[in-house]
Structure formats: structure tokens, C-alpha cells
Amino acid sequence: MKKIYILMMCLIVAFVCTSIFSTYAYGERKPDPSGTNTGNASEIVQAKPGETTITDVANQVGHNKVAINLMWTLLTGFLVMFMQAGFAMVETGLTRAKNVAHTMAMNLMIYPLGMLGFWVCGFAIMFGGLGAIGTMGGFDGLNHEVTVHLFGHSFGIFGGKGFS
């Protein structure tokens, strides 16, 4: 009990010191209750300093769209990790005491095996036809997609490149 108390006190002291030193490092923050000074046009990256063009605004919107989509994908992936822990708890509660260790080990192994399977074939199926956007503008080799042509439109089924 005493060790837990000491640990909690150390965490509180560390939190207070961090908040104090961050205030000194970044200066006093001014309140912005209406939100008018947050996220305005001055934060747009400009090709020529001092001249904001419609192209600069369009580029910023495009970058924000990709960033929001990537963050949403990461957030949902993190939630899947927590789901795996929940499945482990449910299955453990439904088994006999002698089988708990096996059930927990099985649930802890399912996620790494799923990640390995995604690396082998899931990434190609998910991002294989997107080209450079699948790698955030880097490698452009993901440019082949298996498509079906119906009623004059092309429908992408899955990517044909990017396996392993």
C-alpha cells in the first residue's frame, strides 16, 4: 500500500512540474473563449509568404482530408485492439478455471496473427489500387487494381499490387 502511495505522489509531482515548465517554455497562453483565433487563415501554408491564394487553401483542404482519414483509420484500429481484450474477458468468463490460461493465450495470439495476415495480403486488398495515396505520397507502386466493368462504370474490387 505504501508503494502505491509513493507512486501516486510521484505521478502527481511529475504532472505539476510538467504543467509549470510547459507554461514557462511556451509563454503564457491567452484564452480564446470564442475560438476565433484558432484555426484561421494565418495557419495555411503559403507558397509565397504574405500571399494566400485559392490554390494554397485547396492544398490545405486536401492535406486535411487525408490527415483526417488517416487518423480515423488509426483510431478504429486502436479500438479493435481494445475489442480483443474485451473478447478475452468474455471468453475467460465463460470457461472453466482450468482453461483460463489457454483462452487468454489464444486471444493474445489472435491479434498478432491477424496483423501478419494483413501484412501478407490485407494491405494489398485495401490499398493496392490507390497509387501513392496508400503510402501518403511515397512509393507509387500500388497502381494496379482489379476492376469489374458494369453498366459503363468501372468498379474497383481489390488491389493487385502490394502483397507482403
Image (cartoon, rainbow, N blue to C red):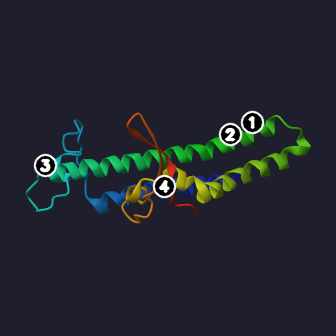
| Residue that numbered label 3 is attached to | 54
Q: Can you give x and y, in whole percent of width and height, for residue 22 in the image?
A: 35, 59
User: Callout 4: few (<14), some (14-19), or many (20+) C-alpha neighbours within 10 Å?
Assistant: many
Total numbered badges shown on the rendered structure:
4
Nearest-to-viewer mark from 3 and 1: 3
Q: Are marks 3 and 1 in contact (CB under 8 Å)?
A: no
Which residue lies under the disc numbered 2? Answer: 86
| Distance from the alpha carbon under mark 3 to that under mark 1 | 53 Å
Give the SS element for disc 1: helix
**Mark toward the start of the polypeptide (1 vs 4):** 1
Please, is residue 79 above or below residue 11 in the view? above
- Distance between the Cα atoms at labels 2 and 3? 48 Å
Foreground mark, 2 or 3? 3
- Comparing 105 with 34, the one in front is 105
Q: Nearer the viewer, mark 4 or mark 3?
A: 4
Residue visible at 23% across and 41% down in the picture: 32
Q: Specify which label sits upstream in the sequence, 2 or 3.
A: 3
Q: Residue at the location (73% across, 54% down)?
A: 109
How far separated are the C-alphas under marks 1 and 2?
6 Å
Residue 19 visible within the image:
yes
**Mark carried by residue 128:** 4
Q: Which residue is mark 1?
A: 90
**Labels 3 and 1: the sequence-earlier one:** 3
Instruction: Indicate the position of residue 39 as horizontal and vertical percent values.
Output: 23, 46
Residue 113 pos. (x, y %): 69, 55
**In x, y percent, where is residue 4?**
66, 53
Q: Please state which amino acid type lies under the numbered disc 3.
A: Ile
Front residue (pair 2, 107): 107
Q: Is residue 119 above or below residue 69?
A: below
